[in-house]
Image: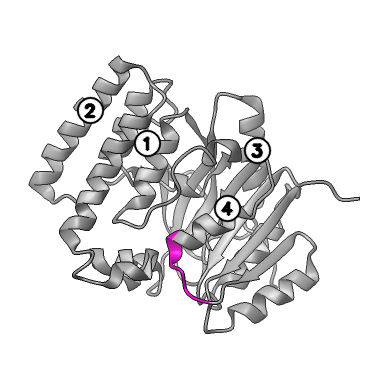
Amino acid sequence: MRTVPRLSIGLPVYNGEEYLAESLDALLGQSYDDFELIITDNASTDGTEAICRRYVRADSRVRYERLTKNVGAANNHNHVFSLTRGELFKWASHDDLYGRDLLRRCVEALDAHPELILAHAWSASVDADGKIIEPFDYTLATDSPSAPERFASLLFAPGGDDFYGVMRADLLRRVKPHASYHHADRTYVAEIAMHGPFHQVPELLYFRRDHPTRAERANPTVRSRCANLDPRRGNRFLHPAPRLLAEYVWGFVDIVRRAPITADEQRECYRHLRRWLTSRARAGVGASNAAMGVASESQPLSIDGIVPGHGVRSS
């Protein structure tokens, strides 16, 4: 009899037919296999459903649910998490690629260090064909034992991919759900970081695909990005851009207010927040700095042999 899997992977998707199969192959080909993969389809209008049902028939670890209407990306992310059973959890994107050992190395790190609440790996951007565009080294101080230092690092350099790390599910059930204001994923990660340090596996194992239909590119304005997260945000009178940006700023204030830290640490976080607000006022509130630098030349420049399903075809 099959027991509850150790790890749950939640994959929310909307109209993902172009890259979905590649991502599923990369996840199901992992060297770590004690997981369930739950896909919640946000009422896709393309071939997403047929692809998902094919994988459900082929692999008992895959579960699929189709929503009757588009509830927005944020609500779909929260919904897929609510369906999971594992002790550990990871969100997956339908268009990204995953090195064969990504899950195993992250789970090993969490098992070896109980104080960690999230583990991820070095990342690179890849193009539509899966070719590496630019590898990155992770430079954020999220491994610091100091909550204010972790908070400051995420404020001033919010460009990592920690949202897609392997996390302890019990913690996620204690924090606020993913919101739908501008950059809500950044405040979500910042809140998680207030509870403990992160770990970055020093191997290039996560590949974020950059393509014209990716959410950030397909939705270039604050309002359009927020409407993608929640269709109700599309009402320009109900949710004007200044309000969406104000919600983003308040999100950080609220994190510090509710964080399980000392009064001195709270004051330090507020000082960091004031410095950040001053810098954003000069550059524009929604602006961000690069959080990762170009990786060393020793890093691989091809995903062949790293990502399941790539580099196996004969030339």
Q: Is residue 28 above or below residue 280?
A: below
SS for callout 4: helix
SS for callout 3: helix
Label 3: how many Cα within 10 Å (few below 14, some 14–19, many 20+): some
Q: Which residue is mark 1?
A: 139
Could you give the CA–CA distance between mark 3 and mark 4, rounded to whole angstroms?
Answer: 18 Å
Instruction: Provide the major secondary structure of the magenta segment.
Output: loop
Residue type at mark 4 is Phe
Could you give the CA–CA distance between mark 2 and mark 3, rounded to whole angstroms?
Answer: 33 Å
Between marks 2 and 3 in the image, the one whose residue lies nearer the viewer: 2
Residue 198 lies, in percent from the top left, at: 48, 33
Residue type at mark 1 is Thr
Q: Earlier in the sequence, mark 1 or mark 4?
A: 4
Label 1: how many Cα within 10 Å (few below 14, some 14–19, many 20+): some
Q: Which sits in the foreground, 295 or 105? A: 105
Q: Is residue 20 above or below residue 181?
A: below
Q: Which residue is mark 2?
A: 270
- Name the side, left or right, on which 290 lies relative to 52: left
- Name the side, left or right, on which 67 lies relative to 158: right
The magenta segment is: 69-74
